[in-house]
Amino acid sequence: MSPSTLKARVIAATTEQPAADATVRTLTEDTKGSIPAQLRASAQAEGDEAADMALSWLEQYGGDFAKALPSHIDVKAFLSAVRVALPGLVHCTPASLRQALLTCARFGLIPDGRHAVIKREGKKAVFVPMAQGYVELMYRSGRVGSVHVGMIHEADEWTYEPSAPAPLDFTHRPALTVPKAQRGPVILAYAFAWMESGARSQVIVLTREDAEEIRDEYSAAYQRANESGANDSFWHTDFNKMWAKSALRRLHKVVPMSAELVALLKADEAGEAGEVQIVHAPAEETHLLAEADEAHERAEESQDPKEVRVRPLPRKRSQPRRTTRKGRKGARR
């Protein structure tokens, strides 16, 4: 088994760390007395000083991050990206900050704002995979050749005809020669993928109303931010990015999925719901693989929208037809 696979990283990051579950339990048990001196001091500092103090505390867990990260990502590079966000995270509980970063590391994503973000919600740090993080994991599946995500502005040229064969069913010509102010507001977000086999997935198209319905129904983070008056959820601050990410997330129904991508969806949903995000149970991998296989079958069926599966007609029987009780002749149906 390759050390870069999710299962290998999960096993390495958890079976050799009996304290991992204790870390999860302390998400709701942290007290002032349990906060390390380095983090207490960083919470009183600002800017680079706060980041350096918090980073000094995190570096003692370098071995944990090394076990969680895939081999192509260096721990120093990972922590360097983390350092940028640390000034805004020093007031989070130590357990939640460490757990959010370990979850991010286990997916092999850098918290650089493009692939993933570690966000503060109250006193809890939350791992948030971004659109580019989903794209990265789709490529890692080995079945996806390219992923396309876009936003259509009012002045752009586009066509969408689901009944037409790919790639004629969808076209988008951005009005790049028009000043940005004249392109108008975004009216649609879309996502689709080309497979290594040469087939193309169904095109996912979301209107603004679709995105708002997804936000209102599924994002507890948005609801909490609304209720508190903070209005600081990503749906508040980066609506278009979340709109595009929602289109990407819906691709999981029509694109071959890996167990790793299924796990990312679950971690993302847990974060949105305010639940603990953790990928640490090797036994769960079997369940994730089964879900991934089901998604792959759905994807294979959706790649050719013009294909119609016809049940073959039954062969005619050579024996004479029977007479029914009502006296009329009829064939078996």
Image (cartoon, rainbow, N blue to C red):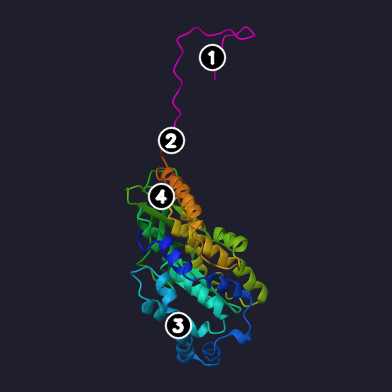
First along the sequence among labels 1 and 4:
4
Majority SS type along the magenta span: loop
Q: Can you identify the residue that label 1 sits on?
A: 331
- Mark 2: few, some, or many residues within 10 Å (few <14, many ≥20)? few
User: Which disc, if any, is residue 151?
Assistant: none
Residue 324 is one of the magenta-drawn residues = yes
Tell which tag, 4 or 3, sits nearer the viewer.
Answer: 3
Vertical placement of 129 versus 31: above or below? above
Question: In the rendered structure, which segment of residues is drawn in magenta?
Answer: 309-333
Residues at marks 3 and 2, CA–CA distance in whole angstroms: 59 Å
Q: Can you identify the residue that label 3 sits on?
A: 60
Q: Quadrant of the C terminus?
A: top right
Tell which tag, 3 or 2, sits nearer the viewer.
Answer: 3
**Badge 3 vs badge 2, beta-carbon distance below 8 Å:** no
Q: Which amino acid type is marked by label 1?
A: Ala
Coordinates of residue 300 in the picture (x, y in percent): 41, 45
Tell which tag, 3 or 1, sits nearer the viewer.
Answer: 3
Q: Secondary structure at mark 1?
A: loop
User: Which disc, if any, is residue 201?
Assistant: 4
Q: Secondary structure at mark 4?
A: loop
Q: Which amino acid type is marked by label 3?
A: Gln
Q: How many marks?
A: 4
- Mark 3: few, some, or many residues within 10 Å (few <14, many ≥20)? few
